[in-house]
Image (cartoon, rainbow, N blue to C red):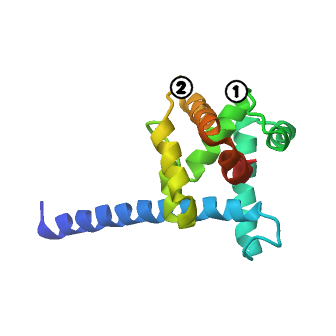
Amino acid sequence: MSRSLKNSQLELNTFWVEAKMAARHLSLILALLVIYDLIPVNQGVEINPMIIKQVRKLRMRCLNQTGASLEIIDYSVKNRILPTDPEIKCFLYCMFDLFGLIDSQNIMHLEALMEVLPEEIHKTINELVGACGTKKGKDGCDTAYETVKCYIAVNGKFIWEEIIVLIG
């Protein structure tokens, strides 16, 4: 193989590695923006309306992909009930997947939020990850659900007020 072809392949591989890292960072930033989108206006940070619009598109994408009921999601968030509907489980998976918080082997990476969230909550995230890790289910949807269920059992207040509201 010629030296220029090898160099081209190396440059292409480097490009894809950098593109994947950029996509991961964008997902984490979007996750952070969803959190801020759900904080009341007088407590939150001013966010560009175009970014908020993009985050809402991702939510709608997961609703459309999974067939999850917006009414069930709103009811469950309001009443702090984690529904067992298969569509809701897959909605959780979809949102975590879009935000880069679950990988292709269905391993949760909640700790990735520490890259974009305030240092004050890093300890809480570490406690959740340490206590729960990833609770394996029969598929990605069930894994996302079982892991969230464990997070709620360990620190329900944090999960409902800081995490679930961002996807609901």
Q: Residue at x 68, y 39 (%)?
A: 91
Q: Quadrant of residue 117?
A: bottom right
Which amino acid, mark 1?
Pro
Q: Earlier in the sequence, mark 1 or mark 2?
A: 1
Q: How far across and down, in percent of the image, does residue 124 sit?
A: 55, 52
Tell me if I can see residue 100 in this picture: no
> Which one is in front, 93 or 63?
93
Q: Which mark is residue 86?
A: 1
Q: Residue at x 59, y 51 (%)?
A: 98
Q: How far across and down, in percent of the image, does residue 122 sit?
A: 51, 58
Q: Is residue 37 above or below residue 98?
A: below
Q: Quadrant of residue 121?
A: bottom right
**Which quadrant would the N terminus be assigned to in this image?**
bottom left
Q: Residue at x 76, y 50 (%)?
A: 60
Real-space Cα distance between discs 1 and 2? 12 Å
Q: Residue furthest top?
A: 138
Q: Characterize the local packing of mark 2: few (<14), some (14-19) or many (20 or more) Cα atoms within 10 angstroms.
A: some
> Which one is in front, 156 or 164?
156
Tell me if I can see residue 41 in this picture: yes
Q: Quadrant of residue 118?
A: bottom right
* 85 lies left or right of 5: right
Q: Of the residues tagged 1 and 2, which is closer to the observer?
A: 2
Q: How far across and down, in percent of the image, does residue 156 sit?
A: 67, 41
Q: Is residue 25 above or below residue 142?
A: below
Q: Residue at x 75, y 64 (%)?
A: 37
Which amino acid, mark 2?
Gly
> Which one is in front, 78 or 90?
78
Q: Is residue 83 above or below residue 25?
A: above
Look at mark 2 in the image and give the residue it sits on.
Answer: 137
